[in-house]
Image: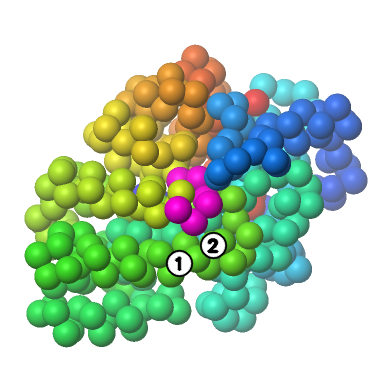
């Protein structure tokens, strides 16, 4: 997620009772159809126009599903009856504030998502190392035994408990990272996810002054393509997160894109290569009003939603464009 999206969450807005928000049966059938063929060979790949939800933080009201609100149904910006997501992008692990630990896979949420005819994408941070993850000490041990060559600068001054990873391979850093990502993706598979979103895969754009490492565009391409291949080998579809400068070079490797704030920064056109290839773009804005970005999203064929202005990613607020 973006730097600001990692800010501490505020209390989620209350959701209306599901009975009051129930969508018409015909609408629900259409949503189920959006999730794709259940008997298709290979990884699930979402249709071009698929409504999505981005919830990386839990809500204690939904403890039975790890804090994920799988029954969310809201009126879109376009108006009409409430609509439900066909795709849920949630963390590999259930929110520790909800379940009391940082090791519980989001299996309950995935099962509930599937029971409602939707699909689940597994959020994995592939380019920075977070101290609160259960495998963190493995990264530290490797870093210390290889000349402190893996863990770079803090992701930000606000988040010193997360550090940029060195994806170069002069001491085998990339090989180690890919091994660790494989273990994480195996857990995505174990939890029953359909796809995986690899976050923080744009170190080359940030530069050494930010990350602590010199990463070339070519090195970033090698790493990102390896991540996509990894997901596919495990039977999951793969999402490219941001890295807009390499979208054209990576569209053939990834099945869809996830983006934050491209309308705010007037750079969504870079993602048109995905739409032209018949691959959806799942996009989220925080500060920009839906009345401003939804018409633009419609023209570009992007599946855009509005989340909280404070960058929290709980279940609500949530406003899809259509």
Where residue 145 appears, x then y in whole percent?
Answer: 17, 85
Of 85 and 309, which appears nearest the observer? 85
Q: Are marks 1 and 2 in contact (CB under 8 Å)?
A: yes
Residue reaching furthest front?
41
| Relative vertical location of residue 174 with respect to residue 96 in this rendering, above or below | above
- How far across and down, in percent of the image, does residue 50 sit? 61, 32
Instruction: Give the residue drawn at x 49%, y 24%.
Output: 278
Q: Read off the residue under disc 1.
A: 184
Q: Dot 1: few (<14), some (14–19), or many (≥20) neighbours within 10 Å?
A: some
| Residue 114 seen in the current view | yes
Q: Secondary structure at mark 2?
A: helix
Is residue 15 found left or right of 298 in the rendered image?
right
Viewer-proximal residue, 14 or 273? 273
Residue drawn at the location 73% of the way across and 39% of the way down? 84
Q: Does the rendering let one see residue 4? A: no
- Residue farthest top in this picture: 299
Give the label on residue 188, or none.
Answer: 2
Mark 1 and mark 2: span between their CA atoms?
6 Å
- Above or below, comparing residue 149 to residue 197 in the picture: below
Residue drawn 67% across the image and 58% down it: 110
Q: Which label number is shown at residue 57?
A: none
**Count of all numbered marks drawn on residues in the image:** 2
**Residue 299 location, x and y as percent?**
49, 14
Other residues around mark 2 within 10 Å, as few (<14) / some (14–19) / many (≥20): many
Image height of 186 relative to 80, above or below: below
- Kindly identify the residue that appears in the image at 39 percent across and 42 percent down: 240
Classify residue 318 by image quadrant: top right
Q: Which residues are magenta?
A: 233-238
């Amino acid at each position: 997620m973006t730097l600001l999206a990692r800010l501490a969450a505020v209390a989620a807005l209350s959701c209306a009772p599901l009975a009051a928000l129930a969508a018409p049966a015909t609408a629900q059938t259409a949503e189920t159809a959006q999730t794709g063929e259940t008997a298709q060979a290979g990884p699930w790949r979402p249709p071009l126009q698929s409504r999505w939800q981005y919830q990386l933080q839990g809500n204690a009201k939904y403890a039975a599903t790890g804090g994920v609100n799988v029954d969310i149904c809201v009126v879109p910006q376009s108006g009409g009856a409430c609509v439900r997501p066909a795709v849920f992008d949630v963390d590999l692990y259930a929110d520790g504030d909800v379940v009391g630990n940082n090791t519980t896979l989001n299996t309950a949420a995935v099962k509930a998502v599937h029971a409602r005819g939707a699909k689940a994408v597994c959020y994995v941070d592939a380019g920075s190392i977070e101290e609160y993850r259960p495998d963190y000490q493995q990264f530290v041990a490797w870093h210390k035994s290889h000349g402190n060559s893996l863990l770079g600068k803090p992701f930000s001054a606000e988040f010193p408990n997360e550090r940029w990873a060195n994806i170069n391979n002069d001491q085998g850093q990339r090989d180690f990272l890919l091994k660790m990502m494989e273990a994480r993706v195996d857990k995505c598979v174990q939890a029953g996810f359909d796809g995986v979103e690899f976050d923080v895969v744009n170190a080359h754009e940030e530069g050494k002054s930010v990350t602590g490492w010199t990463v070339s565009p070519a090195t970033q391409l090698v790493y990102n393509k390896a991540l996509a291949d990894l997901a596919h080998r495990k039977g999951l579809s793969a999402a490219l997160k941001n890295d807009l400068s390499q979208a054209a070079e990576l569209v053939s490797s990834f099945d869809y894109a996830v983006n934050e704030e491209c309308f705010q920064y007037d750079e969504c056109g870079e993602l048109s290569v995905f739409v032209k290839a018949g691959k959806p773009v799942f996009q989220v804005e925080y500060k920009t009003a839906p009345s401003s970005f939804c018409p633009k999203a419609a023209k570009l064929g992007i599946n855009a939603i509005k989340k909280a202005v404070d960058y929290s990613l709980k279940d609500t607020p949530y406003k899809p464009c259509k």
